[in-house]
Structure formats: C-alpha cells, structure tokens
Amino acid sequence: MDRFDEQIGLLIEGLGRVEAALTLLVRERTVKDWYTTEEVSQLLGKAEFTVREWCRHGRLHAEKRRSGRGPYPAWVISHTEVLRYQREGLLPLMGRPVA
C-alpha cells in the first residue's frame, strides 16, 4: 500500500507542475486589445522603462489613458501595434519626445 500512496503522491505533484505551467502559458498568450507598458515589456523581453521611452519618443504607436492610478494617465499599446513591432521593429525617431 505504501508504494501505491507514493505513486499517487508523485502523480498529484506532477499534475500540480503541469497546472502551473499551463497557467503561465495562458497568462503569456492571452490576447488583449490593449496592453500596459509592463505587459508589453514582458511580451518583448525588454525593460518597462525602455517600452515607456519608446512610447514617449513615438517609436511605438501608443496612447495615454487614465489608469486608475491617480491623475496621471499611463501609456497603453494596442495588440495590433505589438504585432507590427514584432514584424517591422521600431518606428523611426522623429522630432522631440511627447511629454
């Protein structure tokens, strides 16, 4: 009976690892209409500061929206723009950065 209990324990442990991996995969691959700079940084493997700077300098098409974090709007990037960046890269640097 001990061997059977051990095997059940190993099976439950393995299922826990599979569930954790699937949860992570779903979180990474969930398609949204708009992403925060933090989400885009994770998708692209870049620092969040870098993504915010790209938005500020117009290197990515982004919008500022109220974020519920007080009076300051936050950058959001569309799913379409994330796909465009993955295909084509950054937009050319133009003029002065947006405040």
Image: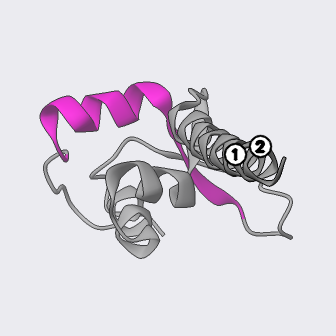
Helix, strand, or loop for circle 2?
helix
In this picture, residue 33 sits left or right of residue 46: right
From the viewer's perspective, is the residue at label 1 or at label 2 nearer?
A: 2
Q: Is residue 73 above or below residue 72?
A: above
Residue type at mark 1 is Gln
Within 10 Å of the Cα at label 2, are there few (<14), some (14-19), or many (20+) other Cα atoms? Answer: few
User: Alpha-carbon neighbours of circle 1 within 10 Å: few (<14), some, or many (≥20)?
Assistant: few
Percent coordinates x, y for residue 46 in the rendering: 33, 64
**Residue 17 image offset from top left, x and y in percent:** 62, 49
Residue shown at 53%/41% (left/top)? 28
Whether residue 66 appears in this view of the structure is no
Determine which residue is flagged by label 2: 4
In the rendered structure, are the residues bearing label 1 and label 2 in contact, judged by CB atoms less than 8 Å apart? yes
Q: Is residue 32 above or below residue 69?
A: above
Q: Indicate the quadrant where residue 48 lies.
A: bottom left
Query: Is 91 included in the stretch rendered in magenta?
Result: no
**Residue 88 covered by magenta stretch:** yes
Q: Quadrant of residue 70?
A: bottom right
Horizontally, residue 43 falls left or right of residue 10, namely: left
- The residue at the point 31 percent across, 62 percent down is 57
Name the residue that disc number 1 marks. Answer: 7
Q: CA distance from mark 1 to mark 2?
A: 5 Å
- The magenta region covers 73-90
**Secondary structure of the residue carrying numbered label 1:** helix
Count the labels in the image: 2
- In the rendered image, residue 1, in percent from the top left (x then y), is placed at 84, 46
Q: Is residue 93 left or right of residue 11?
A: left
The answer to whether any part of residue 75 appears in the image is: yes
Residue at position x 81%, y 49% from top? Answer: 5
Closest to the observer, 60 or 98: 60
